[in-house]
Image: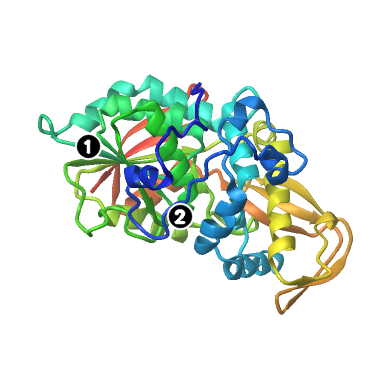
């Protein structure tokens, strides 16, 4: 494991940002760990005691949250998302509205402890990448001239551990010369780039803020297509985190729209490697998505609603974090279950709820292979190769732009 994530070296903040060459405003803001600021961990992570290993990734995200993240997801967006959740109008994608020190630590601890602690997706994807490294090499050099650069686009960047365990092996297998971290949460892309700057010196690193479901990620900051060959990857079953109801079928229209947008930025024959989780075994899903770390993330969203939004009588302690699987549509969800009936106001909207009513803040769709294959065809992709882990729970699809 990388031992110096927090050691940004002697270069200044401006030099660090220049190396990452942000492609869109607002640029990421890095904060070096001040040795005198000994309270930063306790202040930003609540009751959680961060281990020495995880503290190597510490950022002063209190300032990051106020100066950078809220420009991407301002309080107005959070208010709209929270009201929609409590009114059951739009559920399952609210967790994106929290990004601070606690969530970075929680996600990194989840991926670092994957398999051992039940969270199987990162370990399964690492297994697939290791097993099929020759295949990644093959598609990277297919039709590529000697000396021609290769740019790896990472749609939906991961934690430092996930970046080290998955993206680094892909970079090495493909011989990529440039890396573009694409994420709507630009801080996540910045963390991935910083990790790679230490793991693979000399790699050209770029940050691009974009919702790759609806925005163009395929051009550089001057609006020009990237030079040379491109390879696009999306790991972590990110496509499964789409909003939708646990009482309805999987969101085919939204999935096709997202895939179609990605396809629209590719030339015919280009490759898109998509990781998806098809696991519907309830016992292993509960093991993967339950526990203190997942609950920390859920509690963090309630705390941000309480602290950052105008409200009256909203009590986060009236809600417990719960999870469940709908085997009919393959949705595994995380939500808030009200302990008692109550009423509160968010912004100008009054919310009235019953005891035991559940409000979903995070979806993890476990699409069937038949469902995604239909979506691939509808969005203009041709599945050319399928890679799976040994339990066939997680798959990576090599999709060629048709």
**Image spot of residue 244 (x, y percent):** 58, 59
In the image: residue 330, left or right of residue 318? left
Q: Residues within 10 Å of mark 1 (few under 14, many from 20)?
A: many
Residue farthest front in this picture: 36
Mark 2 secondary-structure assignment: loop
Residue farthest left in this picture: 145
Q: How is the image coloured?
A: rainbow
Q: From the viewer's perspective, is residue 353 above or below residue 39?
A: below
Q: Nearer the viewer, residue 176 or 274?
A: 176
Residue placed at 55% from the left, 52% from the top? 64
Would you identify the image quadrant in which residue 398 lies? top left
In the image: residue 384, left or right of residue 295? left
Residue placed at 51% from the left, 57% from the top? 68
Residue placed at 75% from the left, 47% from the top? 322
Would you identify the image quadrant in which residue 180 lies? top left
Residue farthest bottom in this picture: 348
Q: Name the residue beneath numbered marker 1.
A: 150
**Image spot of residue 118 (x, y percent):** 65, 28
**Disc 2 to disc 1: CB gap under 8 Å:** no
Question: Of the residues under marks 2 and 1, which one precedes in the sequence?
Answer: 1
Q: Name the residue beneath numbered marker 2.
A: 184
Q: CA distance from mark 2 to mark 1?
A: 23 Å
**Image spot of residue 95 (x, y percent):** 61, 53
Q: Nearer the viewer, residue 251 or 5?
A: 5
**Image spot of residue 81 (x, y percent):** 61, 65
Q: From the viewer's perspective, is residue 181 above or below residue 56?
A: below
In the image: residue 255, left or right of residue 300? left
Whether residue 118 can be seen here: yes
In the image: residue 398, left or right of residue 332? left
Q: Nearer the viewer, residue 102 or 272?
A: 102
């Amino acid at each position: 494991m990388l031992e110096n994530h927090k050691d940004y070296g002697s270069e200044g903040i401006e030099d660090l940002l220049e190396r990452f060459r942000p492609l869109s405003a607002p640029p990421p803001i890095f904060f070096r760990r001040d040795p005198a600021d000994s309270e930063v961990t306790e202040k930003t992570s609540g009751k959680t005691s961060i281990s020495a290993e995880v503290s190597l990734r510490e950022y002063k995200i209190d300032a990051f949250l106020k100066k950078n993240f809220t420009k991407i997801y301002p309080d107005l967006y959070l208010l709209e998302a929270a009201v929609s959740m409590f009114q059951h109008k739009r559920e399952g994608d609210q967790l994106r509205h929290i990004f601070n020190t606690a969530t970075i630590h929680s996600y990194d601890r989840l991926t670092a402890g994957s398999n051992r602690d039940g969270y199987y997706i990162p370990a399964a994807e690492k297994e697939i990448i290791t097993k099929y490294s020759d295949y990644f090499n093959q598609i990277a050099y297919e039709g590529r001239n000697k000396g021609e650069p290769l740019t790896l686009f990472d749609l939906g960047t991961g934690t430092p551990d996930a970046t080290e365990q998955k993206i680094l092996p892909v970079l090495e297998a493909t011989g990529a010369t440039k890396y573009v971290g694409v994420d709507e949460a630009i801080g996540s892309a910045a963390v991935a780039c910083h990790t790679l700057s230490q793991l693979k010196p000399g790699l050209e690193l770029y940050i691009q803020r974009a919702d790759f479901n609806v925005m163009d990620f395929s051009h550089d900051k001057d609006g020009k297509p990237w030079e040379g060959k491109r390879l696009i990857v999306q790991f972590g079953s990110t496509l499964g985190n789409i909003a939708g109801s646990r009482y309805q079928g999987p969101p085919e229209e939204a999935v096709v729209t997202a895939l179609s947008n990605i396809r629209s930025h590719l030339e015919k024959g280009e490759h898109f490697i998509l990781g998806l989780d098809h696991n519907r075994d309830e016992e292993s899903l509960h093991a993967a998505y339950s526990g203190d770390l997942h609950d920390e993330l859920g509690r963090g969203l309630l705390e941000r609603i309480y602290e950052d939004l105008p409200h009256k009588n909203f009590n986060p302690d009236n809600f417990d974090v719960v999870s469940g699987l709908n085997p009919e549509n393959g949705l595994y969800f995380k939500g808030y279950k009200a302990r008692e009936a109550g009423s509160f106001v968010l912004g100008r909207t009054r919310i009235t709820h019953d005891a035991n009513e559940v409000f979903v803040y995070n979806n993890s769709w476990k699409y069937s292979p038949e469902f995604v294959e239909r979506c691939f065809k509808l969005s203009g992709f041709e599945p050319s190769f399928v890679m799976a882990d040994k339990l066939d729970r997680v798959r990576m699809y090599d999709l060629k732009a048709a």
